[in-house]
């Protein structure tokens, strides 16, 4: 099938199989290996990308259903926008092994765009789609608050 | 000064963008992808393996079986403990054991070829539990020296047990169970291997914590020289012990690369990761402890039974490590320990953060609390009276240099407000404490007390640290940069750290046994100090000053105002210094593991505060305080990160994490079935460091990587006992165990369901009764052979259409019986992979305008298009009128799923039964001749307690529960007509909808009158984002006097389809809500229950959910009744 879409602000035209997932397209076809596969079932968030600004699991997103006007952003395409957040991740030690981190960053960008919720318990709930086995999440919360410029929580 | 600073990782810019390559990111020209054929049987003889069809399949380049390998077992601990080859040769001993591997041009081709390998098995009797393995006449897995299924037995006695018993005034005994926990590294285990036939060199990139072992074992099993194997540097996505020895994929990728002459990549999928990588060993500890009249410990007597799994790996050393802790945490006059390590036909246990410590700590520290209670002492004071202190030599031979257990206990006592809170037990709120110790850098191998490091200063003055270990996320790389920076006076950020590469780096055994910091930082410190001394000397000569006047800075060597850049001191040739650090430790006693085998010992105390809901069985951990003696802290944020990460793992082990098996097969090999804590499941954690500098540690540091998870399960169990007076000794502390404990505490009678009065249930009751008496065996062994599916059909989707109108869509569906509707895909795409859905054409419904939009009609009804995403519906429902819908939506899955999953898709999603989803050939997959694996398997959480038939699954949709309570009608579009059914009419079975091939759900409509009712939703689950264990939606219409005029009470996840509890509705009618009346009304439905053997607790939990939802309908929490209405 023909795939027409925009990935990281560049037009993409590819011939793909019907059952190819967006994750396969960005990693294998476009060489954007920042997006990681950890579960392939839409359960962990390591493969999170933005589709029209919404964080989605690219491992259960059939690429052929993308429409030409749809915008995909991977972690590479968010490098500049995410710089304050990534810097906060580094300075709060919000990653250890780093495998879930690109997904956390992409989700974090989406969260920061819409504004973080007031309470930490709400913010924790917003992170339920990005599993981290290393940190225990406290540092990720701090990094998000730091990036949002509000450390008063 | 770099030591003691929270220095960030040098490579954070690239790492946070995912640009530091992990194994699956490395690309080599001509690379092939490999997939593994695994044993479907727990125990079988391999009669023959035919590979010719697979070899001839398109894209396949090579197939590897045991016949291609030299027939050498992994070394592991050597001697008769070495018992496993990389591929099964003549016998398979667990489900998932590697039998053959295929390398092909693409992953799909390799996967497809697996089915073409013809393996003939002859089944052997299997022992899939410790009890079976120890039974008289049990079939044995190996020919062990000790006979039977006993891989190891130890017996040791310290002090005189008889005398110690004689001095005892009080004693108690208990049995403590710690189940199997999975590491769940986020990066799946993988290996990329490339054989250079010309140079006869094997290059590998692997997920490892210890390149040393990978190289040594690969050379060994492939019969190569160690020098022929090169391990390269690569990012490693988590270890936690899982990767501290060779894993099971390296030799397979390497063997295939040698055979095909091309690079081969083998990466496990998540289910393989769960089911075949080595888990934490399950421990069963019978412990007896005595105290004298002064409250001093007199003796401990422990019987430790450890499940080894099918092969040895680290079972023997994990067992001995646990014994060491049992004999070492407290001063005790006499300790007597007996252990046995038992082979079973399940995948083997292995190294896991804590290494026997968590299991031993759970037993020890639960029993310490029981003892404290028995003799009427404060748990902290009782511990302080008995803990080991600095200068002690423990029974197991640990020579404690620094030992800050008392300081740890005092710290958590002060931080947690212990003295006040401990007075308030029995109220549902509880506080508990536990302590532990961990031996750092145990000399498990003769050379394990040595670590080497190289420091280079290049011609342009740049500093490089070369180190042979691997950092799988521990922060070791940054610590090493800090150490070199400290000694050389430069900024840590300017230092390059090269690790892992066996061509470039000196000897180190890797990151395990909490040796990362204590060994490697000591080695780097020595190398950097000597490099610094050389630089100072050269600078002193250059500047004509004495060496003591030279200090090293970022700008170079300085004396007064004069600075010489390091590049000037190095010249053309770089300065390179390699030094060894050798820890002063002994080899452990080979029989018992005792001896002063560690570099140092770390200590910790944790306090957990919990709230226990006696009605639902839920334990909510409110706060955790974790105090540590790990010596000097080198990097506070990394230190805190190791502790909070460990605490999260400990919380999982305490409350939710457990690998569940049925017939030797793993039932829950998926994130959605394995309850590891998500962000919202973790409480606030306060981390405290109380360590005194350890003289042998680098800058006074000791290890902290493993200890953080050890005390928590006991601290939580102790807090639960404090809160509600029940003692739980079987991890994890799931709500079923809490409720059973509370029933036992209260002397509640056994539940009865008057089945004799319900002829409609006789058939099912009879079937269930026959399962343990051979029916299950017959259906499993023979019935599945007649099943309608021949294994999992691979995804065959070849076309996706995108109709623009509903008419087009239903036409396309009716024209092709292999077509299926596609909406968000979050259920369908995994289902393709799970082999429970195999459409050829997908009809994408998302472009159809008629399915979108949320509209309010003049009559007040709400029409929700089936294509509306859960996220969009949530946005709409945030308002007052439909807030109950929002309540439910917020509990469903994750933001990523809600962004694309649709209302129609949520209602139509397949059942989530973990047997059905995870490949069991069950009644619903294979047809009526197959068993329902839930009848005898673990059905505590996911299965029906009402109306279960041959299948015990439930409808997973939370929206269905809510919509049923809101009298929703479902609009169904078909080729010929549109029809409208009340929501319950949508369902024909568990997660099964009564839709014809040409029909799709087009909208859901909520009537205005129902929207005006007071409605509340409650859901119980194991982790944030989980499916419901039980849920309840109540919807009430009240008259002016506050009496219930009309109500809907619907229970989710208790029956095959949403269950309307009409008996509760009848009980509520005409009454004014009051808390006590609510409690009895909420139970009015239980006469309909017919639970399975172990999920009766869900009946109580469902009552509790109804009760909570009804209580939230009260105008205020007091629930003051209004006049003129009948009182309950």
Image (cartoon, coloured by chain):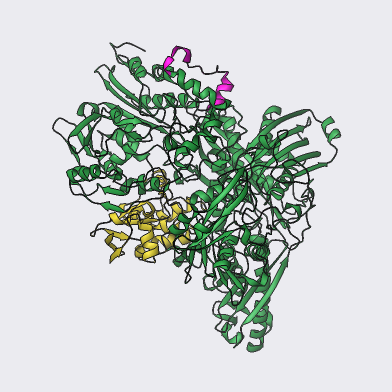
Residue B512 showing in the rendered view: yes
Report the residue at 64% width, 50% height from top.
B350
Q: Position of residue B167 (x, y in %)?
A: 83, 31
Total tally of numbered discs in the picture: 0
Left or right position of B17 against B626: left
| Residue extending furthest toward the left | B858
Q: Residue B377: x, y in percent?
A: 69, 31
Q: Which residues are magenta?
A: B739-760
Task: From the viewer's side, name the closer residue of B751 and B140.
Answer: B140
Residue B790: x, y in percent? 45, 43
> In the rendered image of this protein, which colour is used for chain A?
yellow
Q: Residue B63: within the magenta?
A: no
Give the letter of the green chain.
B
Q: Is residue A71 left or right of residue B857?
A: right
Quadrant the C terminus of chain B occupies: top left
Please tell me which residue is depicted at 43% across the width and 41% down the height of the picture: B789
Is residue B346 in view?
A: no
Q: Nearer the viewer, residue B1077 or B588?
A: B588
Above/below status of B762 relative to B883 = above
Q: Is residue B748 magenta?
A: yes
Q: Is residue B750 above or below residue A1?
A: above
Q: Is residue B729 left or right of residue B960?
A: right
Identify which residue is drawn at 56% across, 19% down: B746
Say above or below: B127 vs B1065.
below
Q: Quadrant of the N terminus of chain B?
A: bottom right
Q: Position of residue B254 (x, y in %)?
A: 58, 64
Quadrant for residue B387, please give it.
Answer: top right
């Amino acid at each position: 099938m023909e795939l027409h879409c925009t990935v990281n602000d560049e037009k993409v035209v590819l011939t793909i199989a019907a059952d190819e997932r967006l994750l396969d397209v960005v990693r294998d076809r476009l060489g954007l290996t920042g997006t990681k596969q950890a579960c392939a079932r839409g359960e962990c968030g390591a493969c999170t990308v933005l589709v029209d600004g919404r964080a989605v699991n690219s491992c259960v997103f059939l690429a052929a259903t993308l429409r030409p006007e749809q915008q995909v952003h991977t972690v590479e395409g968010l490098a500049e926008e995410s710089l304050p957040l990534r810097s906060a991740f580094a300075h709060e030690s919000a990653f250890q092994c780093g495998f879930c981190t690109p997904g956390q960053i992409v989700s974090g960008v989406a969260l920061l765009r819409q504004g973080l919720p007031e309470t930490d318990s709400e913010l924790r709930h917003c992170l339920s789609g990005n599993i981290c086995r290393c940190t225990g999440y406290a540092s990720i919360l701090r990094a998000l608050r730091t990036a949002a410029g509000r450390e008063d929580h | 000064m770099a030591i003691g600073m929270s220095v960030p990782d040098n490579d954070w810019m690239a790492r946070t963008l995912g640009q530091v390559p992990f194994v699956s990111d490395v690309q080599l020209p001509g690379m092939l992808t490999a997939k593994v054929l695994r044993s479907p049987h727990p125990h079988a003889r391999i009669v023959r393996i035919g590979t010719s069809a697979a070899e001839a399949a398109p894209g396949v380049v090579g197939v590897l079986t045991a016949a291609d390998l030299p027939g050498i077992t992994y070394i592991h601990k050597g001697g008769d403990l070495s018992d496993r080859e990389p591929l099964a040769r003549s016998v398979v001993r667990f489900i998932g054991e590697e039998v053959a591997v295929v390398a092909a041009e693409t992953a799909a081709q390799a996967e497809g070829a697996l089915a073409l390998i013809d393996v003939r098995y002859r089944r052997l009797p299997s022992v899939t539990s410790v009890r079976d393995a120890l039974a008289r006449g049990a079939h044995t897995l190996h020919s062990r020296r000790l006979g039977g299924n006993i891989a190891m037995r130890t017996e040791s006695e310290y002090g005189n047990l008889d005398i110690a018993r004689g001095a005892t005034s009080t004693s108690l005994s208990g049995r403590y169970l710690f189940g199997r926990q999975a590491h769940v590294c986020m990066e799946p285990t993988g290996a990329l291997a490339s054989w250079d036939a010309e140079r006869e060199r094997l290059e590998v990139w692997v997920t490892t914590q210890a390149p040393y072992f990978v190289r040594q074992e690969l050379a060994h099993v492939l019969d190569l020289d160690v020098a022929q194997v090169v391990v390269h540097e690569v990012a490693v996505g988590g270890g936690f012990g899982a990767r501290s020895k060779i894993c099971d994929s390296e030799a397979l990728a390497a063997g295939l690369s040698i055979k095909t002459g091309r690079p081969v990549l083998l990466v496990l999928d998540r289910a393989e990761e769960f089911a075949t990588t080595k888990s934490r060993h399950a421990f069963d500890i019978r412990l007896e402890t005595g105290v004298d009249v002064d409250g001093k410990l007199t003796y401990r007597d422990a019987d430790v039974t450890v499940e080894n799994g099918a092969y040895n790996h680290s079972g023997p050393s994990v067992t001995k490590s646990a014994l060491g802790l049992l004999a070492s945490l407290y001063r005790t006059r006499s300790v007597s320990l007996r252990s046995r390590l038992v082979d079973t036909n399940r995948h083997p246990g292995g190294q896991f953060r804590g290494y026997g410590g968590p299991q031993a700590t759970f037993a020890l520290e639960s029993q310490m609390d029981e003892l404290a209670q028995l003799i009427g002492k404060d748990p902290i004071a009782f511990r302080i009276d008995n803990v080991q202190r600095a200068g002690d030599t423990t029974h197991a031979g640990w020579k404690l240099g620094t030992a800050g257990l008392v300081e740890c206990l005092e710290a958590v006592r002060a931080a947690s407000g212990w003295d006040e809170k401990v007075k308030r037990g029995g109220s549902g709120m509880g506080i508990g404490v536990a302590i532990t110790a961990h031996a750092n850098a145990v000399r498990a191998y003769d050379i394990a007390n040595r670590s080497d490091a190289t420091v280079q200063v290049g011609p342009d003055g740049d500093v490089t640290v070369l180190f042979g270990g691997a950092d799988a996320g521990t922060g070791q790389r940054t610590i090493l940069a800090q150490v070199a920076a400290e000694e050389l006076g430069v900024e840590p950020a300017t230092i390059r750290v090269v690790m892992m590469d066996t061509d470039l780096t000196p000897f180190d055994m890797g990151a395990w046994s909490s040796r990362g910091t204590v060994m490697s930082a000591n080695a780097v410190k020595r190398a950097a100090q000597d490099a610094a001394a050389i630089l100072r000397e050269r600078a002193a000569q250059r500047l004509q000053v004495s060496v003591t006047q030279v200090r090293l800075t970022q700008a170079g060597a300085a004396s007064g105002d004069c600075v010489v850049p390091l590049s000037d001191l190095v010249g053309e040739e770089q300065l390179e210094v390699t030094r060894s650090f050798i820890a002063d430790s002994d080899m452990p006693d080979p029989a018992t593991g005792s001896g002063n085998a560690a570099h140092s010992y770390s200590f910790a105390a944790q306090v957990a505060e919990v709230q226990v809901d006696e009605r639902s069985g839920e334990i909510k951990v409110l706060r955790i305080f974790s105090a540590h003696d790990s010596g000097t802290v080198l990097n506070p944020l990394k230190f805190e990160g190791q502790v909070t990460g460990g605490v999260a793992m400990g919380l999982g082990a305490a409350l939710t994490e457990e690998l569940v098996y049925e017939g030797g097969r793993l039932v829950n090999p998926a994130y959605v079935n394995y309850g590891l804590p998500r962000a919202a499941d973790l409480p606030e954690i306060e981390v405290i460091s109380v360590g005194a500098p350890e003289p042998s540690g680098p800058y006074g540091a000791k290890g902290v990587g493993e200890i953080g998870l050890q005390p928590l399960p006991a601290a939580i169990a102790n807090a639960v006992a404090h809160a509600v007076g029940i003692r739980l000794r079987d991890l994890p502390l799931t709500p079923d165990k809490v409720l059973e404990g509370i029933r036992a505490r209260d002397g509640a009678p056994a539940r009865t369901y008057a089945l004799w009065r319900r002829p409609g249930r006789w058939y099912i009751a009879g079937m269930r009764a026959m399962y343990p008496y051979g029916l299950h065996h017959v259906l499993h062994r023979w019935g599945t052979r007649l099943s309608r599916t021949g294994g999992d059909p691979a995804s065959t989707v070849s076309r996706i259409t995108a109709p623009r109108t509903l008419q087009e869509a239903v036409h396309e569906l009716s024209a092709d019986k292999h077509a299926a509707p596609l909406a968000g895909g979050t259920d369908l795409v995994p289902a393709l992979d799970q082999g429970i859905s195999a459409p050829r054409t997908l009809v994408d419904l998302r472009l159809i305008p008629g399915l979108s939009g949320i509209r309010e009609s003049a009559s007040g009804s709400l029409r929700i298009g089936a294509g509306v995403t859960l996220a969009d519906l949530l946005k709409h429902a945030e308002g007052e009128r439909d807030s109950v819908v929002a309540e439910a939506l917020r509990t469903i899955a994750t933001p990523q799923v809600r962004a694309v999953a649709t209302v129609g898709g949520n209602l139509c999603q397949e059942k989530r039964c973990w047997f059905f989803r995870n490949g069991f050939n069950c009644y619903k997959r294979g047809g009526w001749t197959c068993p329902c694996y839930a009848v005898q398997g673990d059905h505590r959480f996911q299965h029906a307690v009402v109306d279960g038939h041959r299948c015990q699954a439930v409808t997973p949709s939370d929206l269905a529960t809510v919509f049923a309570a809101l009298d929703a009608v479902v609009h169904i579009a078909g080729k010929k007509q549109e029809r409208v059914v009340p929501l319950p009419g949508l369902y024909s079975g568990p997660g099964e909808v009564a839709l014809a091939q040409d029909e799709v759900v087009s909208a859901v409509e909520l009537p205005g009158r129902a929207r005006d009712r007071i409605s509340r939703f409650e859901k119980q689950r194991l982790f944030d984002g989980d499916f419901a264990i039980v849920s309840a939606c109540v919807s009430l219409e009240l008259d002016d006097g506050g009496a219930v005029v009309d109500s809907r009470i619907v229970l989710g996840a208790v029956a095959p389809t949403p269950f309307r509890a009409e008996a509760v509705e009848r009980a509520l009618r005409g009454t004014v809500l009051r808390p006590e009346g609510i409690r009895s009304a909420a139970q009015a439905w239980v006469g309909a229950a017919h639970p399975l053997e172990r999920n009766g607790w869900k009946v109580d939990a469902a009552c509790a959910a109804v009760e909570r939802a009804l209580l939230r309908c009260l105008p205020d929490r007091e629930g003051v009744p209004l006049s003129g209405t009948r009182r309950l």
